[in-house]
Amino acid sequence: MAERYADRAGFRTVYIKEAHPEDEWQMDSNEEEDVCYRQPRSLGDRLAIARDFTERFDYPIPLLVDGMDNGAMHLYSGWPERFYIVGADGTIAYKGAPGPHGFLPEEVEAWLDEHPPAAAVPASADVAVEDTAPVS
Amino acid sequence: MCSRAARIALRLVLTVVVLALGWLAWTAYSVGGPRNLLGMWRYDQREEGNLRVGDPAPDVLLTALDGTTDSPLLADRGDKALVLVFGSFT
């Protein structure tokens, strides 16, 4: 998605507190997929897991790591996973629901489809309006 | 009379044993690996949050993967939209 919509949006991942660490609410799927980590107690722990993640999936999207005060997670209520879109004007343009059920890439794609880059808006659009305007 | 007292005592002992076993099972489940409903009850932190569409996006200082570079969440956006993906490995 990031590559497909690169002409109209940047993408950034915020790596936050683990959702299903083995010392908290571990899921069967974590064990099946060998994703077993304890909840980080330091920024170094969190960075190490984030690096494992990016290396395992050759993750292409720029990634920043939340501090141990979980500042970004709290500001954006981002746990366990969530999408937002910040518009070019710096305001929240799209707010997804919390995951897993509200984590919907198709909603992000729909927003991006509806907001093409300015250069992609046909220049003829204005002309068409003028052409159909009544002559006074 | 003795027989009745013995039956009551036996019931009490059985009740205590059953309660103790239940407590042990609960403790083992809680400590050893809380999952599903119990895990959700203890660790679910999902919340809708106060941000609304149209609000200014709040910025916050984060750390790059190299562990030494601090970077504002909203830095270098240019004139395009920015898709934020919050998540973790597990």
Image (cartoon, rainbow, N blue to C red):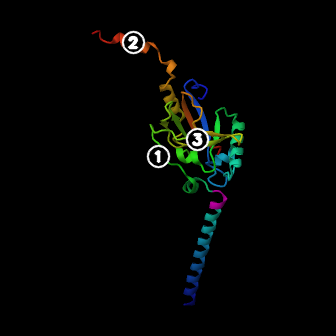
Q: Give the secondary structure at mark 3.
A: strand
Q: Residue at x 68, y 47 (%)?
A: A46
Residue B3 spot, x, y in % from top left? 57, 87
User: The disc labelled 2 sits on which kind of residue?
Assistant: Ala
Q: Which residue is identified by label 3?
A: B86
* Residue in view at x 62 percent, y 48 percent: A17
Q: How far across and down, in percent of the image, does residue A112 sit?
A: 51, 28
The residue lying at 51 percent from left, 30 percent from top is A88
**Is-magenta flag for residue B31?**
yes
Quadrant in which the N terminus of chain A is drawn: top right
Does residue B72 lie above or below B13 as drawn? Answer: above
Q: Nearer the viewer, residue A50 or A104?
A: A50
Marks 2, 3 in one chain: no
Q: Secondary structure at mark 2?
A: helix
Looking at the picture, tell me which residue is in the foreground, B86 or B2.
B86
Q: Position of residue A91 (x, y in %)?
A: 48, 35
Dot placed on the residue nearer the N-terminal end, 1 or 3: 1
